[in-house]
């Protein structure tokens, strides 16, 4: 997995790229959560993520919960088809 | 259920028990499913279920601390359009009664893997592991 963080109009956009599994979930977590922790609005662009397992979904749940706690925005944008499919299975938990 | 008659096939591969192997498990599964001509959408669902089961071995049976040479084996077989995926490992014995996904209203990270496996597969069965194995998990799906 690779990533890029872009700042646009006071929003941090995290572009994730590749496959997100247990092996790299911590890297995604350490990229996304500190941005939310600092009070920024965060968007995660998932257009180039071609595989995500439960570890990746867990990072997104943590992001959502931390954003609620910090009263900031956390959004998923341009969700790829493979990720949408996994999210649709997990949606009852989200 | 698929209308395609999938050719009978059996293939297995051993992987080191660590999180870096999960990508190799996915590559192996995709290669086998290509040979079986399983359609793309179903293929990726099956890959997810298998990778989640392998992840459970790394995370739970070995608690992320397997020795560097420890192996797990994944065997994929297809017979009469019934797909069977078997996992063998030598980790802590799994108590099948304790393996369940969490409650739907319990929103917290983690624990989704078992839910995905149960959603995707028709059956999930823990069998007695025959020596040298301790755990033997079998996932099945009618194609």
Image (cartoon, helix red, strand yellow):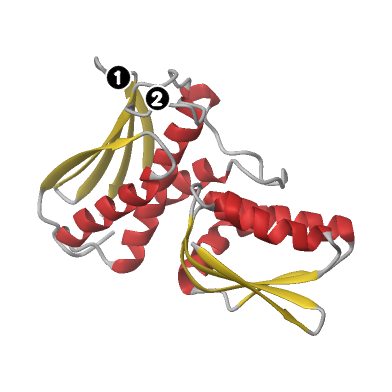
Seen from the viewer's position, the closer of residues B102 and B71 is B71
- Residue A85 against residue B138 in the figure, above or below: below
The x, y position of residue B17, in whole percent, is 37, 33
The answer to whether residue B34 shows anywhere in this view is yes
Q: Is residue B91 left or right of residue B63?
A: left
Location of the N terminus of chain B (image quadrant)? bottom left
**Where, by quadrant of the figure, is residue B129 drawn?**
top left
Q: Chain of mark 2?
A: B
Above or below — where is B123 with respect to A72? above
Instruction: Work out whether residue B67 or residue B91 is closer to the camera in this orientation and state it.
Output: B67
Q: Which residue is mark 1?
A: B129
Q: Position of residue B24 (x, y in %)?
A: 31, 49
Instruction: Judge the density around disc 1: few (<14), some (14-19), many (≥20) Cα neighbours within 10 Å.
Output: some
Question: Residues at badges 2 and 1 in contact (C-beta under 8 Å)?
Answer: no
Residue on which disc 2 sits = B67
Nearer to me, B89 or B41: B89
Between discs 2 and 1, the one toward the N terminus: 2
């Amino acid at each position: 997995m690779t990533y890029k963080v872009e700042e646009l109009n006071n929003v941090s956009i995290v572009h994730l790229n590749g496959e997100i599994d247990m092996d790299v979930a911590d890297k995604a977590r350490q990229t996304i959560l500190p941005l939310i922790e600092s009070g920024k609005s965060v968007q995660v662009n998932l257009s180039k993520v071609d595989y995500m397992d439960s570890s990746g979904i867990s990072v997104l749940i943590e992001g959502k919960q931390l954003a609620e706690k910090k009263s900031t925005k956390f959004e998923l944008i341009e969700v790829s088809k493979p990720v949408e499919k996994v999210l649709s299975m997990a949606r009852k938990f989200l | 259920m698929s209308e395609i008659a999938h050719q009978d096939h059996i293939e297995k591969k051993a992987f080191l028990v660590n999180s870096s192997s999960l990508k190799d498990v996915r590559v192996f599964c995709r290669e086998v499913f290509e040979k079986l001509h399983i359609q793309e959408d179903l293929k990726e669902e099956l890959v997810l279920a298998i990778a989640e089961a392998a992840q459970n071995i790394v995370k739970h049976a070995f608690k992320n601390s397997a020795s560097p040479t420890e192996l797990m084996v994944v065997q994929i077989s297809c017979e009469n359009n019934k797909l069977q995926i078997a996992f063998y490992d030598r980790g802590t014995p799994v108590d099948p009664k304790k393996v369940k996904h969490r409650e739907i209203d319990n929103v917290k990270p983690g624990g989704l893997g078992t839910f995905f496996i149960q959603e995707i597969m028709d059956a999930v069965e823990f069998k007695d592991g025959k020596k040298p194995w301790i755990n033997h998990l079998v996932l099945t799906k009618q194609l």
